[in-house]
Structure formats: C-alpha cells, structure tokens
Image (spheres, rainbow, N blue to C red):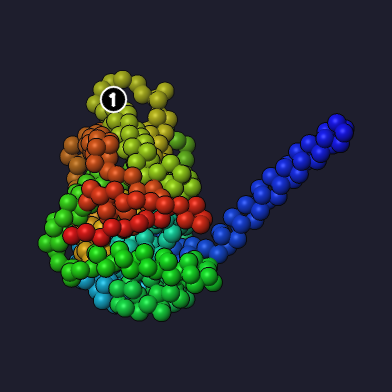
C-alpha cells in the first residue's frame, strides 16, 4: 500500500509539472494571439507616427544640405545668415497651424487632419526640388512647418486614444523614434547624393503615408463624441482584434462615461485653467516642452555637421559622425519603446535629464579649456564626441519622446485639442528661437557657454520632473485626468489582468 501511495504521489507530482508546462505554453500562445490581434492597433500607430518621420526628414535636411549650398559654386548660393533663417523658419509654420487644427480635430476628426497634414509636407518637398533661390527654400520650410504643426497637435491625441492602457507608452514613443529615423535618413543619404535626388527620395514618405492612412480607423473616442456608436464599436473591434461584443461594449461604456463627464461643456481656452487637473497638466506640458527644447536638441540636430566641425576627437568626417550619432539615437529610441511601459515615465525622465545635464557640462568644460586656455587637450580629444553620444542617447531615453507622448494622456477630451495646439505652437516657437539664436550664441559667447546653458536647463528639468511630473504608466486616460484633479479612482482587475477603472462622476 505504501508503494501505491508513493506511486500516486510521484504521478501527482508529474501531473503538476505537466500541468505547469502546459499552462506556461498556453500563456505564451495566448500572448502571441493577443499581440497578433493588436496588429492593426500597432499598424495604425506606426502609420500615424510617419508624420513625425516626415517632420524629422525636414528638420534634419538642413544638416547635410546647407554646407553644400554655402559653397562658392552652389547652384543656390546662400549666406550663413540666410542659412540660419532657412533652419528656423520651419517653426514659423508650426506656430500658425496648431490652433486651427486644435479646433478642427473635434469637428472633423483625428484621421482626416492627419491625412491633410501630409499635403504641406509634399508641397514643401516639391518647392525644394524646384527651388532656385534662398527665398524659395524659406517658403518651403514655412509650408512644411504647417504640416508639422498639424501633426504635432493631432498625432499624440490619435495615438493616445487608439491604444490600450498596457501599450500606450510604447506606441507614444513611436513619434520620437520616427523622428529619429527621419533624421537618420537625411544624415545617411544627404552627404552622398545630389540636392535634387535627396529631395525626390524624401518626398516619397508623404505619398506612402497618404496611401496607408486611408486604411486606418478613426479614433473610437472621436466617433463616440459624434454619437456614432456603431462606427465606434466597429473601430474598437478592429483595433482590439476582438469579436466578442460584450467586452467591446464594456470598454465603449467606460469611454462613454469618461466623455460624458469631460464633454459637459464645449472647448474654450479658459477651460484649460478651469480645474486643478487641467492647470496641473498645462504646467507639466509647458515645463517639459521648455526643458526639451531649451536643452539644445534641435540646435544640435539642425546643425549636426557644424557641431562636429567644432568637436574634435574622431578620425571620421563631420557628416560621418552625424550618421553614427543618428544611428545611436535611433537605437536608443527603440530601447525607450521597450522600457517605457516597464519602468514608467518618471524614472526615464529623471535618468534622461541627468544624463543630458552631465554630458553637456563636461562638453562645455572641454570647449572652454580647449579654446580659452593654453592647456594641451590632445589626449582628451575623444571626450567631446563621447559627450555628444551620451547626450543624444539619454535624450532619446526620456526627455525626447515622453513629453509629446504625455501631452496626449493628461488632458480631458473637451480641451485636449486646444491644449495640444498650444503645446505644438510652443514647440515651434522654441524651435525658431533656439535654432536662430544658437549660431549667434556660439559666434558671440562661445560654444562652451552655449553648452553650459543647455546643461543648466536640463538640471532644472531634474527637479521639475521629481517634484511635479506624475507617473502615468498603465493608467487609463480617464484615471490620469481624475488623479491630476486629486481624485483616487478605485480599480479592479479585469479578465486579462489589466487594471480597469471604476469612475465615480461628481461635480
């Protein structure tokens, strides 16, 4: 009998092991199924983020192109001052476009505006291809800014609203990743192809985007805002890969409850300061944008080859250094996509601002010693290139992608369009200011002072993030808005293990 009992125990133990292996295999298969079902969600986010790739190509086009145009025998002769205007005028269009886009996004929808944003990009590339003077280039940059302004105002809303809570951070970082890929495209091809060839190749992206975006669904949030529930249900079923209407109806009901509270009144600019939550969100958005832009990133990217010419330490040419750093920055953005929903926004933002500040302090110190003292710095000529790499990598880990992604998370639906329009306008204004004044500061005050100023801004950013920026990882859009208002909504675990919110609507 004891032998039988021992055999029974061994059999039970084996059964447990088999059961555990079966459960693990089943969990992996289920994960694959869930990821496959999310394919359209990822495809829609990828396609919408192509607007940022188009913006990245235009923002970085000046880096390999302006040095060619400033040569003596250029087919479009330009001065250095005209070159700085060509760089900065991209932001002028970005200042003009977001405000009407913020109004129209709740009237005509997210998808139509994203489709429309491709037209200024395409027109701008045609203007560049057929340009014959510096004025033509300035006009093209301004026109492109219109498309970038629309994209910056609308894309974060679209991505935030189509994404599930568990992957919203990953999808939000696609915007910065695509912008880096656009920069990498220009850095890699610009030095080695003709002016016209680069323009023609770059103009392909708006065409591809227009074709793909026609097949993507509209945001379920917008469809519910327009009382088009049947269309919202179909869009949500496509995005979630679900055929079970019950679970889709439950998610629609949660979205509708949130919208019912948030859309009680029409959007007005003063609503941005009407509640504690919108005031906090506005301060956080403005603060993160100022830290991002005045940290120096666009000045460095738009003038990458010039930056490397004043940065010794590599046997590579300035254009080759720009390619290498562009590649490193792109890889860092991919890392951010995998970390943002694991580690959260705050840890990445704190690491990023610290890394940017430290690298630029060292860079400024090297430039000061190299230019202002008699000390021999030959043994440390590798240091500036290392600092730039560290700066761009840490920037791409947090302060680069996350401010734009968080802009689409923090505001209630009735003011989201207006809020992101203001954010996009501020981004463009800062771009104009920083890129226009960068060369003036380098020529008048020295590169070391410029780098130290950027480092000071990033240092302020460390404290700003630590004391003011909340964590939004894994939270629904409704939860984030409630918590910014000081509420603590209850949570329960749904069928997939994701946290779902129980909202108590109060006035």
Give the image location of residue 476, x and y in percent. 37, 56
SS at circle 1:
helix
Say which residue label 1 marks.
369
Nearer to us in this view, 292 or 187: 292
Which residue occupies 23% across, 48% down?
486
- Residue 144 lies, with reference to residue 492, above or below; the image says below
Q: Quadrant of the C terminus?
A: bottom left
Give the image location of residue 445, x and y in percent. 18, 37
In the picture provided, is 11 more to the left or to the right than 260?
right
- Residue 37 lies, with reference to residue 329, above or below; the image says below
Q: Quadrant of residue 151?
A: bottom left
Nearer to us in this view, 278 or 216: 278
Nearer to us in this view, 249 or 348: 249
- Residue 303 seen anywhere in this rendered image of the structure: no
Give the image location of residue 3, x and y in percent. 88, 32
Give the image location of residue 435, x and y in percent. 24, 51
In the picture provided, is 1 more to the left or to the right than 125?
right
Nearer to us in this view, 142 or 20: 20
In the picture provided, is 168 more to the left or to the right than 98?
right
Query: Exactly how many numbered labels are in the figure?
Result: 1
Q: Quadrant of residue 267?
A: bottom left
Which residue occupies 39% across, 69% down?
252
């Amino acid at each position: 009998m004891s032998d039988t009992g021992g055999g029974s125990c061994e059999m039970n133990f084996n059964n447990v092991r088999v059961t555990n292996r079966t459960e693990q295999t089943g969990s992996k298969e289920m994960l694959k199924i869930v990821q496959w079902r999310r394919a359209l969600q990822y495809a829609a986010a990828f396609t919408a983020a192509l607007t940022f790739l188009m913006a990245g190509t235009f923002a970085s086009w000046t880096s390999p192109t302006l040095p060619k145009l400033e040569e003596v025998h250029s087919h479009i002769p330009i001065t250095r001052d005209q070159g700085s205007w060509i760089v900065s005028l991209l932001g002028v269009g970005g200042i003009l476009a977001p405000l009407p886009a913020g109004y129209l996004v709740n009237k005509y929808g997210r998808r139509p505006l994203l489709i429309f944003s491709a037209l200024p990009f395409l027109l701008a590339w045609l203007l560049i291809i057929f340009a014959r003077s510096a004025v033509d280039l300035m006009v093209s940059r301004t026109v492109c800014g219109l498309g970038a302004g629309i994209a910056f105002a609308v894309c974060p809303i679209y991505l935030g609203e189509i994404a599930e809570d568990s992957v919203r951070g990953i999808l939000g970082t696609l915007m910065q990743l695509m912008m880096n890929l656009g920069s990498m495209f220009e850095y890699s091809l610009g030095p080695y192809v003709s002016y016209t060839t680069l323009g023609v190749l770059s103009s392909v992206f708006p065409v591809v985007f227009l074709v793909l975006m026609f097949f993507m669904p509209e945001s379920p949030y917008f469809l519910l805002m327009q009382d088009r529930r049947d269309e919202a249900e179909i869009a949500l079923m496509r995005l979630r890969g679900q055929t079970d209407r019950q679970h889709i109806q439950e998610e629609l009901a949660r979205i509708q409850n949130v919208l019912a509270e948030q859309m009680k009144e029409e959007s007005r600019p003063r609503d941005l300061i009407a509640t504690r939550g919108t005031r906090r969100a506005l301060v956080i958005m403005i603060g993160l944008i100022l830290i991002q832009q005045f940290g120096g990133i666009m000045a460095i990217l738009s003038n990458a080859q010039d930056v490397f010419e004043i940065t010794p330490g590599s046997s590579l040419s300035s254009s080759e250094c720009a390619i290498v750093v562009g590649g490193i920055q792109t890889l860092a953005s991919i890392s951010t996509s995998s970390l943002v929903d694991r580690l959260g926004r705050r840890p990445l933002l704190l690491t990023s601002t610290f890394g940017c500040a430290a690298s630029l302090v060292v860079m400024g110190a090297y430039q000061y010693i190299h230019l202002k003292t008699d000390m021999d710095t030959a043994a440390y000529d590798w240091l500036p290139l290392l600092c730039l790499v560290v700066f761009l990598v840490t920037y791409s880990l947090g302060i680069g992608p996350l401010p734009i992604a968080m802009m689409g998370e923090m505001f209630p639906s009735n003011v989201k369009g207006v809020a992101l329009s203001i954010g996009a306008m501020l981004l463009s204004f800062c771009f104009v200011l920083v890129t226009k004044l960068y060369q003036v500061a380098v020529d008048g005050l020295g590169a070391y002072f410029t780098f130290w100023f950027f480092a000071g801004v990033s240092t302020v950013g460390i404290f700003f993030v630590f004391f003011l920026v909340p964590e939004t990882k894994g939270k629904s859009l409704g939860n984030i808005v409630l918590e910014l208002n000081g509420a603590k909504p209850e949570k329960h675990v749904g069928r997939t293990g994701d946290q779902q919110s129980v909202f108590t609507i109060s006035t």
